[in-house]
Image (spheres, rainbow, N blue to C red):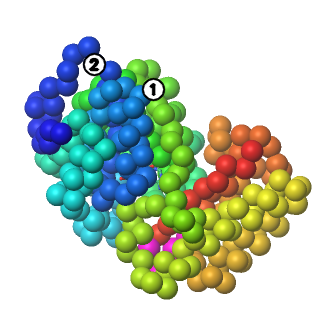
Amino acid sequence: MRIVEQIEDLNLPLGQRVGFVPTMGAFHEGHLQLMRRAKESTGYSVVSLFVNPLQFGQGEDFDRYPRNLSLDSEMAESVDVDVLFVPSVSAIYPNRLSTHILVPQVSDRWEGEHRPGHFDGVATIVAKLLNIVRPDVAFFGRKDYQQCAVIQRMVADLNIKTSISIEPTVREPDGLALSSRNRYLNQEERQAAPRIYIALNECRESILTGQPVDAVLNHGISYLKESGFAVDYLAYVSDDTLEPMESMKVGTTLVCAAKIGSTRLIDNVQVA
Ligand code: AMP
């Protein structure tokens, strides 16, 4: 595995299909799954590790975001990554950035509302990385459901040639979605954390059996509050528009963001 810091040192092999996984490091099995898929489906995997300041808001965890390059390199090496691209902030943003990519509509609600500017930062860095690496396929986790929608829309709108592959959410045995932020949880919070997934599944069952969506969501929110969460949102949305749905339809997902202690967790389950 090559570890590359400078854009001009990437030197990707000509005529070789390339699979790309953009990440912010602090690798876990969710990241490794994407790396394996990238290698399997193209034969050559490039992983970027860049904690992107542009997608963190004021008071978010940019400074304390977990960073451990030597452990991350070992993990990437263990799944046969070909290139680990670890640019510095100044390599990616050498000048004040004038151009930003905004993906309104799909960005507006949910995470967009609770983290203003977040998806502008995500879309801008992903567009830059796709231009730098020019992969055939880029891999993203369904765990970040709205992020997937934003990237798919951006790639379609801007005629970016990379295909986007969305991979399933990898979970702990108790259902908690793997996340680099899970390491912030203390023991008590860790015990409560799988209740987000439990709530999502209970809501899913109730919606599928025809119960009124409003009542189902209110019940889910109460359950999470009783479990010690501060709920940012629990919503039933259309996969096309990310708008809230009032009754059961095909192409829909339940999305949730909730804070336990000082850690904010997000998760989602497909309904139909
Ligand atoms: P991050 O390093 O958090 O920016 O994540 C890098 C990529 O890994 C994104 O496409 C995430 O959606 C994906 N990812 C994070 N957690 C999981 C998970 N539990 N299962 C699958 N993919 C994940």
The boundaries of the magenta stretch are 258-263
Say above or below: 174 vs 72: below
Q: Which residue is mark 2?
A: 16
Q: Which residue is mark 1?
A: 163
Say above or below: 173 vs 76: below
Q: Residue furthest top?
A: 15
Q: Residue furthest right?
A: 210
**Distance between the Cα atoms at labels 1 and 2?**
15 Å
- Report the predominant secondary structure element of the magenta stretch: strand
Q: Earlier in the sequence, mark 1 or mark 2?
A: 2
Q: Residue 122: within the magenta?
A: no
Taking the spot 30% from the left edge, 34% from the top edge, the residue there is 45
Can you see residue 249? yes
Ligand 1 within 8 angstroms of badge 1 C-beta: no
Q: Indicate the position of residue 150 as horizontal and vertical percent values.
A: 50, 40
Which amino acid type corresponds to the residue marked 1 in the rendered image? Ser
Query: Element at badge 2?
Result: loop
Whether residues under marks 1 and 2 lie with C-beta atoms below 8 angstroms apart, the answer is: no
